[in-house]
Amino acid sequence: MEHNLSMHGMHCDSCAKIIERTVKKHEGASVKALDMQKNAITIECGQEQLAEIKSELGSKGYQLLTDGEAAKEGYEAGSIGRGLDFMLKVAKGGKEFAQENRLAKFALLAFVAILAVQALLYLTVFRNMPKFMDTYGSVILLSAVSIVSLVFAYYHASAFRRNATCMTGMMTGMTFGMAGGFMIGAFVGATNGMFIGSLAGMAVGMALGLQAGRCCGVMGVMEGIMGGVMAGTMGAMISVMMIFDNLVPFLYILTAVELITLWLFAYMLYKEYGNIAEKMLDVNGLEFAVFCLAMDILVTIVMVYGPKAGVVLKP
């Protein structure tokens, strides 16, 4: 049967596509008419399906309203509540978020593995270096957190590679190029100076941006590379400029902001494409951990043994 409803939270053509894809996921259901100017929608589906569709769309920020039903506050675009709800569902690992939860477990195990390897390196190699922890402790910890978060976000985005539109692909390339480049550039810049920090930030940012942006062809690749170039140099430059002005506390704040940005990007993909199906998540725990460990050890080697120029963090 057809249901004539009001739609709260619909703003653009992208919203319309998300709504249509969500409805079509339910067998036999379809959007018969959609008027963004009047916030009106006509859906053909069964009564039980309508309840499921309303619930699913509600988690993405869209409310289907019957005559006389008022929209609830806190579900509008940009709502912090919906982002937190997404985070909790991933953490709890409900049936529909099983793959996202599996990816989160990979990230946690990889972080524990990195801490174990770093502890071993400290006991066997770094402990005799004067005031090693005072100089490198914070940046090594923050780089580990950042790398695991970047790899989590990368594999989450890669699950939707085949569904990505050109616009989403370009945004994906730019996001990973800038996030990876800025964080690694800032950490290495703090310990090695502008030149090595810029090179390290550019290398990581460009590699991540290129790989993530490939889903939409040359435009995504270009966005990813340019994001890595700009952010890698900017991250190193900020560390050099702030070396005498509470740099380490700033790096903690920077990392927190970048993590929030990556989480919001993951939520954007969920809103756009829905949950990850099992066949879409092409990674296992060992591959995830090895990827994280390889990046982390390489960055640590550069920070500790790489050339240092200018004023950098010292004991």
Image: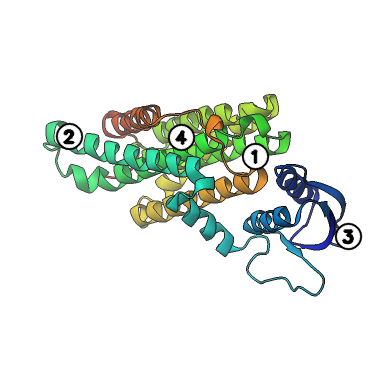
Alpha-carbon distance for marks 1 and 4? 19 Å
**Mark closest to the chain's N terminus, 3 or 1:** 3
Q: Position of residue 8 (x, y in %)?
A: 76, 63
Q: Nearer the viewer, mark 4 or mark 3?
A: 3
Residue contact between numbered discs 2 and 3, judged by CB atoms under 8 Å: no
SS class, disc 4: helix
Which numbered disc covers residue 171?
Answer: 1
Nearest to the eye among marks 4 and 2: give it.
2
Numbered disc 2: secondary structure: helix
Residue drawn at x 48%, y 43% is 98
The residue carrying pointer 1 sits among few (fewer than 14), some (14 to 19) or many (20 or more) residues within 10 Å by Cα, namely many
Marks 2 and 1, how far apart in space? 38 Å
Task: Please state which amino acid type lies under the numbered disc 1.
Answer: Met
In the picture, measured across the screen, residue 124 lies left or right of residue 33, that is left
Tell me where residue 292 sits by quadrant: top left
Quickly name the residue at label 3: 37
In this view, the residue in front, 308 or 276, is 276
Q: Answer whether residue 186 is visible to the viewer in this image.
A: no
Q: Nearer the viewer, residue 178 or 241?
A: 178
Looking at the rendered structure, the kind of residue marked 4 is: Gly
Earlier in the chain: of badge 4 and badge 2, it is 2
Q: Secondary structure at mark 1?
A: helix
Considering only order in the chain, which callout, 3 or 2, is on the residue closer to the N terminus? 3
> Which residue lies under the disc numbered 4?
201
Q: Residues within 10 Å of mark 4 (few under 14, many from 20)?
A: many
**Residue annotated with mark 2:** 120
